[in-house]
Amino acid sequence: MRLSRILAFGASAVAVGLIAAVYPGLSHAQWQPSKPIRVVMPFAAGGAADTSIRALTDRIQPRLKQPIVIEAKPGGGQLIAAEAVAKADADGHTILWASSTLIVSPILTGARFDVARELVPVIHLGEATIMLAVHPDLPVNSMSEFISHVKANPGKLSFGFAGNGSSMHLAGELIKARTGIDLIAVPYKGSAQLLPDLLTGRVPIAVDAITTLRPHVNAGKLRIIAVMNAQRNAEIPNVPTMAELGFKDFAIAPWVGFFLPAGTPREVVDTWNREINAVARTSEFAEAVARGLGMVPRGGTPEQFAALLKQDIAQTTQIIQSAGIKAQ
């Protein structure tokens, strides 16, 4: 408990800058870009992330009245893209699209990049739903049965996940910590590599995204036990969250959002927030990102996104250090 408090305090102290960087109160000033806009993303061009970003920027471009160019800078656990934006002019013409891996990389690798100091959170665009799934041969249909079965077989069962230090990995480790069960963690490079072992039962348990698991659940090849997010997913309304199952404050979800360089004027932050919110709330955008990323749009204020980041940094730091997760 003492270690948990120390880690949470330290991570919270680092994250205080996220709140400070977003000035209190909303500005009513309207910023207008004066030249082409660059949206930097930490993934390769042509993928699902690229398609989803374009679904957003294609709708924002007419509103901002400037061309928008998508620039792919993959690698480095998203830090290559983040550093490029952090070094850009803080005038609103360069903006970063990133996911929750952005806060994991510095914690996991010790990289010298301080998200709280070098970037300003603009908006929590959305989150993916991740779930605890089991192979049908595992004799469990509920979380209580799952816990009892694993406790009866300590150290004999493994859970798979895509990406060392990913939200899926962190969720699995948090399940272990909160329930006291003994599972073997098996990292995979991606869901495509995990699925064959999961579907054959070689790895009988997994934490993965709804987009990966849903077709196989519908086909009766997998069974869902619980949702890791704070809220249920409308596509699987009968599957409870971990919090609903009695694990208070249990919530882990891969998020995506936008950031601007530190020092960006508040009226610029507000304009970007306002324009992205306007598009994110449309049914057309919701359908596009649901198809491409399995993502649920969120939106909200810069302060709300900053609060989410502060919470995630504290929780991620604690899980990584408590579970002894190392960079690979």
Image (cartoon, helix red, strand yellow):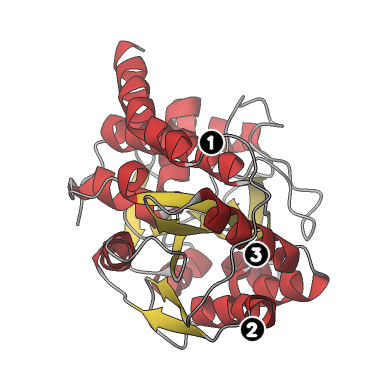
Please give the residue where the numbered disc 1 appears in the rendered image. Answer: 307
On the image, numbered disc 3 is attached to which residue?
276
Name the spot of residue 179 as percent of width and height, x first.
50, 27
- Under circle 1, the secondary element is helix
Quarter the N terminus occupies: top left
Q: Residue at x 47, y 85 (%)?
A: 69
| Left or right of 59, for residue 183 | left
Residue type (three-letter) at the residue carrying disc 1 = Ala
Disc 2/disc 3 C-alpha distance (Å): 11 Å
Residue 134 shows up from this direction: no
The answer to whether marks 3 and 1 mark residues whose Cβ atoms lie closer than 8 Å is no
The image quadrant where one finds the C terminus is bottom left
Q: Is residue 279 left or right of residue 312?
A: right
Q: Amino acid at mark 2?
A: Asp
Q: CB atoms at circles 2 and 3 under 8 Å apart? A: no
Mark 2 falls on what kind of element?
Answer: helix
Crowd band around label 1 with a 10 angstrom C-alpha radius: few (<14), some (14–19), many (20+): some
Q: Nearer the viewer, residue 293 or 31?
A: 31
Q: SS class of the residue under badge 3?
A: helix
Q: Which mark is residue 58?
A: 2
